[in-house]
Amino acid sequence: MHLTSWIVLSAAVAGVSTAVTPFTFPAPDGFPNLSPAQLAQIQKGAGGTLSNAFLPTSLKSGAITALQLLANNELFEVAFFTELLANITTNVPGYDEASTSPLDRAALIKAISAIVNQEELHSIGANAILAGAGQPPIAPCQYDFPVSTFKEAILLAQTFTDIALGTVPAVQSLFANDGGEEIRNVPLLGSILGQEGQQDGFFRFVQGKTPSAAPFLTGGSLSFAFTALHAYIVPDSCPKPLDSIALTYFGALNVVTKPSAKNMTLAYTVDGPVDCKTQSVVYLSGQNAPLTVPISCKIHSRGGPTWFKAEFPFEAGFSNGLTIAAVVNGTGELSSADAVAEATVYGPGIIEVD
Ligand SMILES: *[C@@H]1O[C@H](CO)[C@@H](O)[C@H](O)[C@H]1NC(C)=O
Ligand SMILES: *[C@@H]1O[C@H](CO)[C@@H](O)[C@H](O)[C@H]1NC(C)=O
Ligand SMILES: *[C@@H]1O[C@H](CO)[C@@H](O)[C@H](O)[C@H]1NC(C)=O
């Protein structure tokens, strides 16, 4: 990963917004207010239809929260890929022929167009499950993407898709365990997971990376995805305020050092206090148990953000692709991604290593 793109990503996670006109719905294809003919066109472009199978008539509260997160996330992805497609097709500087070379431009446009349509159907699907159980659907917000070149955009797409790939299994687990009708939607979520994995392989391939990052991808917890999503949403622009969703919005954890695939020390910053005696850094990587490391007691905060370091023991068995870091209360080992989220004060720190 180039340093510049790393800085862009860190800024994204910190919620630093760039001065651009945000994309606003409706999209050029009419989404989200679709006539039957427009929906048919989207299904054609997506390569398949919405599911006509089981819809729950009631949902447990945790499933409602999870679907509100997923619908928000899919709407954000529709906005992102619609804007990306427009940038490429209209040759915006940084997205023109020279910038996308040596990729086959027609194939690239075809691939991103399919993704726009597929994400539209994912969001309609999540909202259909909410509506089927009498819950109001999620309407789009306004978004602001901290990217201005094709390379930055594809890296960001890879990163937020990696986060989604860790979140959907957490939702499957919730659906399977809450005793509600939604257990019958676990396979549907599995099909979305595979679909997003196909997209991610494409984003990685386009960057010259091995399409499949690791044997087991990094898991997550709903509140980590929720916090990461906030960074791309124009504050107070959501019709259903994000704060009304029953998830935790953590303080930002910025990864300052460019990470690489070896044992190394990483510098981090946060806005707020850090205590090396009572807190620690925990990593989620692959499907391994969370790994806790101490925070170095050399902590600086000269009126600005708090700066500190912790080891990044990649060679202890971390996976290529996404690793999630979090500053947690306590210094012991934690047993699951949800247990890490429960104890998190700052996070997720987004680390991509390839
Ligand atoms: C599209 O290009 C504009 C202008 O450079 C940029 O501000 C925006 O973030 C880009 N969006 C995407 C998704 O690449
Ligand atoms: C990397 O760090 C881990 C955890 O501290 C350690 O077990 C391992 O031996 C280290 N590997 C190398 C090659 O230094
Ligand atoms: C972490 O500890 C601080 C200080 O005791 C407390 O205020 C905060 O609520 C704790 N947060 C979590 C997630 O446990």
Image: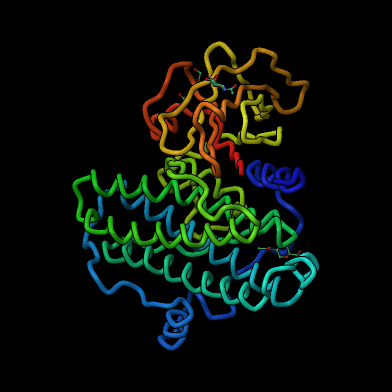
Residue 299: percent from left, percent from top: 69, 17
Q: Quadrant of ligand 2?
A: top right
Query: Which quadrant of the structure image shows residue 274?
Result: top right
Q: Who's the residue at 41% across and 69% down the image?
A: 124
Residue 268 visible? The answer is yes
- Give the quarter of the figure containing the C terminus: top right
Q: Who's the residue at 64% across and 15% down the image?
A: 296
Residue 144 visible? The answer is no
Is 142 above or below relative to 352? Answer: below
Q: Who's the residue at 70% across and 71% down the image?
A: 87
Q: Is residue 44 left or right of residue 179?
A: right
Task: List the single residue furthest toward the bottom.
Answer: 37
Residue 75: percent from left, percent from top: 50, 63
Residue 195: percent from left, percent from top: 43, 62
Nearer-the-camera pick, 266 or 205: 205
Q: How many marks?
A: 0
Residue 210: percent from left, percent from top: 57, 52
Is 136 above or below relative to 161? Answer: below
Nearer-the-camera pick, 241 or 189: 189
Is 208 above or below relative to 278? Answer: below
Q: Is residue 223 left or right of residue 14?
A: left
Q: How are the colours assigned in the image?
A: rainbow
Query: Which quadrant of the structure image shows residue 20?
Result: bottom right
Q: Who's the residue at 71% across and 32% down the image?
A: 257
Q: Is residue 286 left or right of residue 262?
A: left
